[in-house]
Amino acid sequence: MGYLGVAKSLSGRRWVGPSAEVERQAESLRQRGGYAPGLAMVLSRLGVLPDVAENYLNPRLRDLLPDPRSLRDMEVAATRFLQAVDRNERIAIFADYDVDGGASAALLIDWLRQMGRQATLYIPDRIDEGYGPNEPAMAELAGTHDLIVCVDCGTLSHGPIAAAQGADVVVLDHHLGGETLPDCVAVVNPNRQDEDGALAHLCAAAVVFLMLVEVGRQLREAGCRGPDLMDMLDLVALATVADVAPLKGVNRALVQQGLKVMARRERPGLVALSDSARLVTAPGAYHLGYVLGPRVNAGGRVGRADLGARLLACRNPHEARAMAERLEELNAERREIEATVRAAALAQAEERGLDAPLVWAGGEGWHPGVVGIVAARLKELTNRPAIVIGLDGDEGKGSGRSVAGVDLGASIQKLAAEGLLIKGGGHRMAAGLTVARDRIEEAMVRLTDLLGRQGAGEGGAADLRLDGMLMAGAAQIDLVEALERAGPFGQGSPAPRFAFADLRIAYAKVVGQGHLKVTADDGLGTRLDAICFGAMDGPLGSAMMNHGGARFHLAGKLDINEWNGRRTVQLCVDDAAIPA
C-alpha cells in the first residue's frame, strides 16, 4: 500500500512516505526546536538531529572547509604552482570539456590574472581527441611551457603525462585512481586509492579551490596576499551542482555561499549566461544544474570545446555576451540532437526491459556529445544506472549515469581492468567508456552483474518519495523560505516534496507549451495555486482538466511565484492521484 493509499497514481507511480523513524525524529525536532512540521520532516529525512539543526540551517564555510593538506600531494602541488607564479614561468592548463573542467580552468585563470599572470588554456575536442590528456597535445604543450596543470582529468593518464618531456605536471582531479599514479610532480585527488575517502564527494573545481586555499596560506606565510577566494565560489558552486556531486557537508556550504556570490552578478560570463537564458531571479541550485550548466556544456558537446571555460573566465562584458549567445545557439542544436537520440535509446531500452540493474542502449552514429545527457534521462526515468553508447566503426563510445548508493565509476574501471573495455573511468555518479563493437553485449552483461551486487535495480522505478502531508493552509511563504534554509537541494539531498490530500479542482487552464495552471480548494476555505509543467503531454493534464468534480491528492514541491512585484506560494505538481 502506498502513502495516502496511493499504490498507483495517475502517472502510474507508487507514493512512498516517511518512515516511522523519520516521523519520530521530526516530532522531536518540532518539540525541541519549535520547527514547523514541514521543515522538521525535511530535516529528519536529511538525518539532522535536534542538537545540530541550527548549525545545519546556518552552515559556515570556515567550520566545514577541510584542511587542504589533508589531501596527499596538496602542499607539493601548491608550492610548485606558486613557484611558477613567482618565477613568471609559462603555465598551461589542460582541462576537461565539461562544466567541472571549465570551472576548474576558469578558477586558475581568474586567480592568475589577479596576480598579473597568464596561462594557456587547452581543452581537447570531444570527438577528435576524447577525454583527458593525450600524448600529442601534452608533448606540444611541454615544448612551450614550464608547468602543465591538468584539471578534472589526468589521474589515469600515465602515457600522456610521460610524453610531457621538459615540463612539470600537476594533476588536480577527482576521478577514480588506479593502482599506480602517473609520474609527475603531484596528483591531488580525493579518489586516489591511498586516500581515506573522506573528501571523495568533492568535484574537481572544489579540489582546485582547496589548492588555491593552500596557495593563499603559503603566500601569507611569506608576507604576501593573494586574491579573495570567496569571490570565486560562484564557479565552485556551478561545478559542484553540474557535476552531480552530493550536496552534503562542505559541498552544501560551497554551493550555498557560491549562490550568494552569483546573486551579486559580478562575473561577466555568468551574467551573460543568465541573461541569455532569460533568468529573471537570482539562480538557485536547480538553475545551475538544468539551466546554466547545460549551456556551459554545449560548446564541449556539439561545438567549440573551450567556449564554456573561456566564457566563465571572461572579464569583458561584450565578449561574454557574444560567447553566451553562441552557447545558446549550440545548446538549441544540442537539444535537437538529444531528442532524436533519446527517442531511439528509450525505444531500445524498453524493448530490452527496464527492470534490470542496468538500463542501456547503443546506436549507430549517436553523437558522443549527447549520450551522457540521454543516459541521465534514462536514469531519471527508471531509477537505475544507465549507459548510452554511440557506435562508430569498430568502437563505441559511451557515457553513464548512476543512482545514489551505486558506484558506477568503480564498476566501469573494473571492466576496463578485466579487458572488457578499451578504456573507462569516472566517479560514483558518472563515467565514460570506450568499447569494441563486438564486445558490447558481453561488457553490458558483466556491468549489469556488478551493479546488481551493489543493489542497483532494487528501488521501484515508479516510486515517488514524499516528506509527508501538509494542509493547504500550511503552504505559506514563511514555510517555503524556511525550507530553502535546509537547502540547497540536489544530488544526495532531494528537494522537499509534500502531498496535499483531498483537494477539489476549482480552476484549470492550459498555459504555455502544454503546462497546466490549477487552483485547488481544500473545502475549508483555503485555496492552493499549482502549476503542472508538461501536464498535457501525459495523463495528469486530461484528468485534471476533465475532473468532473472529482477530488485529487496532489504531490509536489512548494515554490514562491513572483509576478508583477507580488509573491505567492504555488505547488509545482509532480503527480496526482484520485483518493481511494
Image (spheres, rainbow, N blue to C red):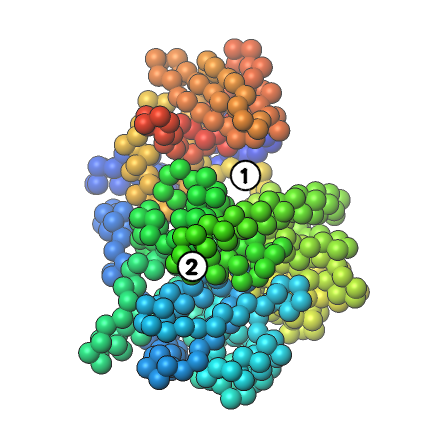
Q: Position of residue 378 (x, y in %)?
A: 62, 47
In x, y percent, where is residue 113?
A: 36, 68
Find residue 500 and report its image quarter: top left
* Residue name at image x 58 percent, y 68 percent: 124
Say which element carries label 2. loop
The three-letter amino acid code for the residue at tag 1 is: Asp
For disc 2, the marked residue is 314
Determine whether the residue tagged by mark 1 lies in a helix, strand or loop: strand
Residue farthest along the front direction in this orientation: 318
Q: Residue at x 61, y 79 (%)?
A: 135
- Circle number at residue 463: 1
Q: State the residue lying farthest toward the bottom.
A: 166
Q: Residue 273 versus residue 526: which sits nearer the camera?
A: 273
Across and down, in percent, residue 385 comes to 60, 53
User: Taking the image as drawn, is residue 195 in sight?
Assistant: no
Task: Tally the marks.
Answer: 2
